[in-house]
Image (cartoon, rainbow, N blue to C red):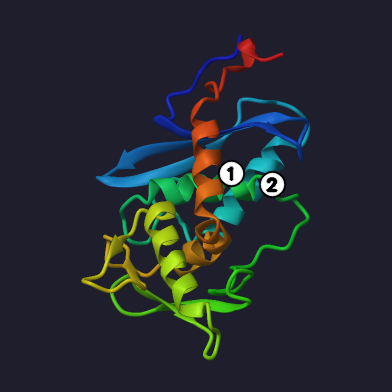
Amino acid sequence: MGKTLDLGLRVELQPMDQHCHDISLGLYQRDIDGVPHFLVHTYSAAPGSAARVTFIKQAMTVMLGLKESADSPGWLRFPCGTVHLRALNRGFLDLCKLANDDTLEPKPLTGFDKKADSNLTAQGLDEGVYEIKPEPGADKGPKRAEALARGFLKVCEMTAVGDSTTKVAFPCKTNHDALMGMLFFRAQNVRASMQEEEMAASRGVLSAPSQQE
């Protein structure tokens, strides 16, 4: 009979992975020596499930900027030693949409914005601060830069910097370029992202093998 493992708190769930027999993938959090760590796990024994977990874990290191725990094999952590839970959960769900043969590489900090009809850039400054800059000469660029900054405030749970409407910062005072790049599109479309989060919050729990069909 299968048993539920003590993996800590489940913080996100992909209930049906279309790339691997519709298995469930859970993201778990546990503090190790006072530092939040994260684990990708499935209770499924379906063919390819272990390889799928390995791929998602690798994707989180490359495209979200997490790193392997030196003392706890299989667990990941942010280099800053803190937790960016909303950004992590959103990134995890987006990475679960990738197939195992997809190329993994960090996304750029510059992206095209349809409403501005030009590029916007999240330029990293010091101590976790980013400034959203429009492309020179774009009429709607400045307004869209402000909108993107507001999007990052919500999607990544960042903080405003003084009176600036285009500067945002991670409370941990550490730059997270990969995380910013991964969620660039989400910050541009923050309303849709928030609606997806509400739908995700209503999902069920990840069940043990004995409870799965």
The answer to whether one can see residue 74 in this image is no
* Element carrying mark 1: helix
Single out the residue that lies furthest toward the front: 139
Q: Position of residue 140 (x, y in %)?
A: 52, 77
Residue for point 46% across, 70% down: 177
- Verify CB contact (< 8 Å) between mark 2 and mark 1: yes
Query: In the image, 15: left or right of 200?
Result: right
Residue 150, horizontal then vertical, whole percent: 40, 61
User: Local crowd at mark 1 within 10 Å, few (<14), some, or many (≥20)?
Assistant: some
**Between 113 and 5, the one nearer to me in the picture:** 113
As displayed, is residue 174 above or below residue 17?
Answer: below
Task: Kindly report the distance in space between the C-alpha atoms of the residues bearing marks 2 and 1.
Answer: 7 Å
Q: Residue at x 29, y 61 (%)?
A: 159
| Quadrant of the rendering where the N terminus is positioned | top right
- Is 1 on the left-hand or right-hand side of 31? right
Relative image position of residue 80 (x, y in whole percent):
32, 61
Report crowding for label 2: few under 14, some 14 to 19, many 20 or more residues within 10 A (C-alpha). Answer: few
Front residue of 194 and 71: 194
Q: Can residue 127 be seen in this view?
A: yes
Quarter containing the C terminus: top right
Residue that carries the numbered disc 2 in the rendered image: 97
The amino acid type of the residue labelled 1 equals: Leu
Amino acid carrying label 2: it is Lys
28 over 183 or under it: above or below: above
Name above or below for residue 206 compared with residue 132: above
Q: Position of residue 59 (x, y in %)?
A: 61, 55
Relative to 162, does residue 29 appear above or below in the rendering? above
Q: Name the residue under label 1.
A: 93
Q: Is residue 143 left or right of residue 188?
A: left
